Image: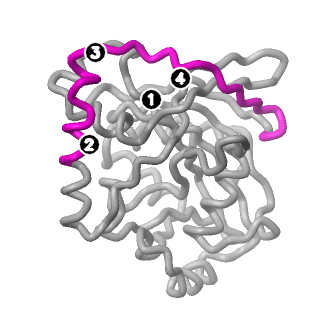
Amino acid sequence: MTTPQILFKGRVAPENIKQLIIPSQRVTKEDIESKIDEMWAKIENGAKQKGCVAYNGLSYRFEGFSYEDEVLTIKLSTLEYKVKVGIRDYPNYYDLSFEHFQRGSFVSTFLVTSDNKFVMARLTNRSMNHNKIDSIGGVNEIKEVDEMVSIKDLLTEEIREEALVSEDELLSMDFLGIYMTGLTNIGFHFITRCSISSSELVSRSNANNDFEIEGIEVFDESELREFLSIHSPTKKLLLEFLDLAKSEKLFT
């Protein structure tokens, strides 16, 4: 793995986030590209053994950003899923430069309940995510080729699917920053408040039919801080976003 890092930190209103599609700037190496299909075949076989299907869809690669006059512009290009995950099996991949990294993007959030608890997803062993407990969120994938979905709308849908919280039950959503994980994915992190109590969300989770979601985990602030601090280096980064959210009085 590489060293996780924060690329941008700051509170931004979702309506002040713009997304641009540009040609891919990923620097390629012939010996890497020639082996991606071979690497992908191994991933497909591994998924079959878990009872899953490794779907080679399209997602968005993070190309960069600019921040001016309180407007955050995120630049993205298209990326095949097999490239996103297959390239990481290349020997010494993590010794390559930032320009070579796959940089597939995703959204994640601190989901805060009406009783000021933090909700995370507990994942099944059928999830392609290696974490057992993770933030609510999901891959920034392309569902309609001719239509880009905003990261706000993507996150709203992920919250509905994973926590069973509808858009009407969301009170606020604030962007907190951009970070790179140890696996060279790029996360767009938010804090989202909802009008539902933690006990109600636990009850709802028992009816969740998402094959990747086993349930939810509920933390108070101190428990969340402890969980993040003893988890992976990537999770420790989220403490900085939690501090930002607290300084902005986005939770109590």
Amino acid of disc 3: Leu
Q: Nearer the viewer, mark 3 or mark 4?
A: 3
Pointer 4 or 2: first along the chain = 4
Which quadrant is home to the N terminus? top left
* Count of numbered labels shown in the rendering: 4
* Residue 252 in sight: no
Name the residue that disc number 1 marks: 103
Say which mark, if any, is on residue 96: 3
Left or right of 89 on screen, residue 160: right
Identified at 59% across, 83% down, the residue is 204
Q: Nearer the viewer, mark 2 or mark 1?
A: 2
Name the residue that disc number 2 marks: 40
Pointer 3 or 4: first along the chain = 4
Assess whether mark 1 and mark 2 are in contact (beta carbons under 8 angstroms).
Answer: no
In the rendered image, the vertical position of residue 200 relative to residue 55, given as above or below = below
Amino acid of disc 1: Arg
- Cα separation, mark 3 vs mark 1, equals 13 Å
Pointer 3 or 2: first along the chain = 2
State the extent of the magenta-drawn residues as a range: 14-42
Residue 196's spot in the image, x, y percent? 71, 75
Amino acid of disc 4: Leu
Name the residue that disc number 4 marks: 7
Q: Secondary structure at mark 3?
A: loop
Task: Decide: few, some or many residues near mark 3? Use Cα within 10 Å; few <14, some 14-19, many ≥20.
Answer: few
In the rendered image, the vertical position of residue 130 relative to residue 18, given as above or below = below
